[in-house]
Image (cartoon, rainbow, N blue to C red):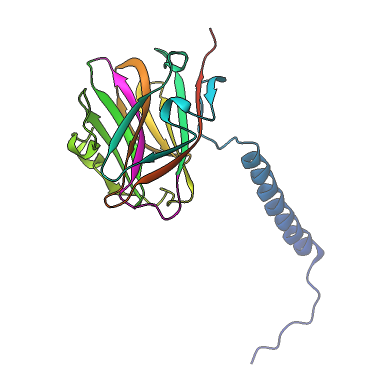
């Protein structure tokens, strides 16, 4: 049987181990500071050029939509998206206990007379649809922008009682990127006409009670 050595550990080995621990601590601390300063946040197109916390034009700050009914609202002219870079974000919250079939979304007018709609539902689904104008009450009647963008479950959709933020960002390529609660989802080229707005759908058996929390547009200042 081998007898364990009683010789002391060399000093250089202790110093090396201590230096390794200090290095790990420093890396973790620097990473935390970087994240806290928002370096890891998705990029935005520029400063806020328009903002609204009441969304009176969308029946806000709280909108009740009866079961099965769909409503479309258009943002005011000062909120039109520019022809170049922009980041548009809308934050809203379905009331706790809402019918899970309730849904809401943000739409963009396209240059060929349709509406591209980016939406979430109370039962944790997300979709991107292309709707004609006049648009149907329920966007499920509209074709998905891509086959895989039909209603699909997504774990980052917050349940009723918690807010969701739908953000639309024009990428350098010109494609419009959907971000849900800060996480990047799909992007697709969309020719825009400038107008945009929001859409709300009542639940299957009960109304949708939606609280608008904020809307803001970021773009380059002229």
- Location of residue 136 (image quadrant): top left
Eyeballing the image, is 37 above or below 162? above
- Location of residue 5 (image quadrant): bottom right
Which residue is at the front of the view, 111 or 54? 54
Task: Tell me residue 31's x, y (percent).
Answer: 64, 44
- Location of residue 71 (image quadrant): top left
Q: Which residues are magenta?
A: 94-111
Q: How many marks?
A: 0
- Left or right? Give the position of 197 relative to 152: right
Eyeballing the image, is 127 above or below 190? below
Eyeballing the image, is 7 above or below 151? below
- Left or right? Give the position of 214 relative to 32: left
Which residue is at the front of the view, 22 or 115? 115
Task: Tell me residue 148's x, y (percent).
Answer: 23, 42
Eyeballing the image, is 84 above or below 156? above
Q: Can residue 97 be found in the magenta stretch?
A: yes
Which residue is at the front of the view, 178 or 22? 178
Q: Can residue 150 be found in the magenta stretch?
A: no
- Left or right? Give the position of 137 relative to 24: left
């Amino acid at each position: 049987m081998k007898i364990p050595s009683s010789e002391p550990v060399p000093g250089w080995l202790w110093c090396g181990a201590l230096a390794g621990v200090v290095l790990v601590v420093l890396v973790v601390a620097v990473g935390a500071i970087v994240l806290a300063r928002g370096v890891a946040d998705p990029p935005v197109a520029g400063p806020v050029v328009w903002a609204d916390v009441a969304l009176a034009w969308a029946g806000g700050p709280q909108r009740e939509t009866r079961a099965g009914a769909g409503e479309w609202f258009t943002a005011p002219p000062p909120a039109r998206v520019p022809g170049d870079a922009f980041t548009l974000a809308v934050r809203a919250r379905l009331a706790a206990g809402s019918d899970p079939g309730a849904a809401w979304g943000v739409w963009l007018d396209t240059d060929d007379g349709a509406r591209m709609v980016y939406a979430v539902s109370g039962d944790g689904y997300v979709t991107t649809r292309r709707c004609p104008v006049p648009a149907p009450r329920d966007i499920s009647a509209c074709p998905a922008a891509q086959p895989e963008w039909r209603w699909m479950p997504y774990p980052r959709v917050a349940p009723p009682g918690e807010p969701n933020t739908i953000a639309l960002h024009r990428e350098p390529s010109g494609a419009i990127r959907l971000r849900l609660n800060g996480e990047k989802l799909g992007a697709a080229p969309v020719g825009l006409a400038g107008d945009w707005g929001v859409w709300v759908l009542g639940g299957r058996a009960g109304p949708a009670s939606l609280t608008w929390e904020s809307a803001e547009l970021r773009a380059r200042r002229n």
